[in-house]
């Protein structure tokens, strides 16, 4: 039936309609760059045809070759049937205007912290030129470390991850951005292998999915490395480590900024005396917290 249907496709409009229907029919889950079937289908079609990703309308009625139709249908089928995140199919992920290489060795980049870094974390950092040392803990693909290096051009950035596979991907991205002299990748179980050093800023998007939610994850998320998602029974296993150790690694006046998913209530119950600052991001006020060095235990 699919082979017969292919013969009816002529334009991008035809394939877009088919892609939306196919993804919705497969009950695909979104959240790795797109929020709905329309945006996801449009992205996959434009990427596959090597067209500008922000320019769908002018091409909607463009007639396609047989090989182009075959390529688009193939990638839409892989997305719908295998429930693979689009970023793994295209081997790219975008944070704002910045593109990063990704594959199944790393979690698909989607951190709220990426919204804050290009503005140099204003208004919380008043003198960004004095930010000279940054630590990105649980760096994965290296995306936040790279964004930090771009936003703070005088800073040296240490990017830590326990996974050598993830660091191989991060190495590729650091090389692509020509930041090898400023972004230094470190294989370590959090702070374990870090030398004594003081940072002006520590950022982290650690694993924070609790065990119950891990069991309920949609199929798309099961393609991602479990080590990059699972945060222990209550989701705070790695966050506790950050809170416990960061004071000893922050310079005076330094700041810790952490993303923790839907765990705000759990965190505040665990640390009722800590004066968390909740930073507003596109998802709301419950996903990213900040603590100053002198506020940490």
Image (cartoon, rainbow, N blue to C red):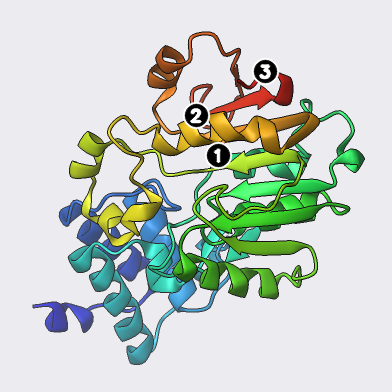
Instruction: Classify residue 50 as left or right of residue 6.
Output: right
Marks 3 and 1 in Cβ contact (< 8 Å)? no
Q: CA distance from mark 2 to mark 3?
A: 19 Å
Q: Position of residue 184 (x, y in %)?
A: 70, 63
Q: Classify the position of the C terminus by image quarter.
A: top right
Spatial CA distance of label 3 from label 1 is 23 Å
Q: Looking at the image, which residue is at 43% across and 57% down?
A: 107
In this rendering, position of residue 103 left or right of residue 139: left
Q: Which mark is residue 59?
A: none
Disc 1 to disc 2: CB gap under 8 Å: yes
**Badge 1 is on which residue?**
112
Q: Residues within 10 Å of mark 2 (few under 14, many from 20)?
A: many
Circle nearer the viewer, 2 or 3? 3
Residue for badge 3: 295
- In front here: 221 or 188? 188
Give the residue pinned by disc 2: 287
């Amino acid at each position: 039936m699919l082979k017969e249907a292919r013969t009816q496709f002529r334009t991008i409009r035809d394939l877009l309609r088919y892609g939306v229907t196919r993804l919705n029919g497969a009950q695909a889950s979104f959240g790795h760059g797109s929020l709905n079937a329309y945006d996801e289908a449009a992205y996959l079609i434009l990427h596959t045809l090597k067209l500008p990703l922000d320019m769908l309308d002018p091409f909607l009625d463009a007639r396609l070759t047989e090989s182009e139709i075959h390529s688009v249908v193939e990638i839409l089928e892989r997305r719908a049937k295998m429930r693979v995140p689009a970023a793994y199919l295209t081997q790219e992920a975008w944070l704002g205007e910045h593109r990063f290489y990704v594959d199944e060795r790393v979690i698909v980049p989607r951190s709220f912290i990426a919204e804050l870094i290009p503005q140099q974390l204003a208004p919380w950092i008043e003198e960004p030129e004095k930010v000279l040392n940054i630590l990105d803990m649980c760096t994965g693909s290296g995306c936040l470390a790279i964004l930090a290096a771009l936003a703070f051009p005088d800073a040296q950035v240490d990017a830590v991850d326990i996974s050598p596979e993830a660091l191989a991907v991060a190495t590729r991205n650091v090389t692509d951005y020509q930041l090898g002299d400023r972004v230094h990748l470190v294989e370590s179980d959090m702070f374990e292998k870090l030398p004594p050093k003081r940072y002006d800023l520590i950022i982290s998007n650690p694993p924070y999915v609790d065990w119950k939610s891990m069991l309920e994850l949609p199929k798309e998320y099961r393609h991602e490395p479990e080590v990059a998602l699972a945060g222990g029974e209550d989701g705070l296993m790695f966050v506790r480590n950050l809170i416990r150790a960061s004071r000893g690694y922050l310079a005076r006046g330094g700041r810790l900024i952490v993303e923790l998913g839907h765990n705000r209530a759990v965190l505040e119950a665990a640390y009722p005396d800590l004066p968390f600052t909740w930073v507003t991001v596109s998802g709301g006020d419950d996903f990213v917290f900040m603590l100053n060095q002198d506020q940490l235990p």
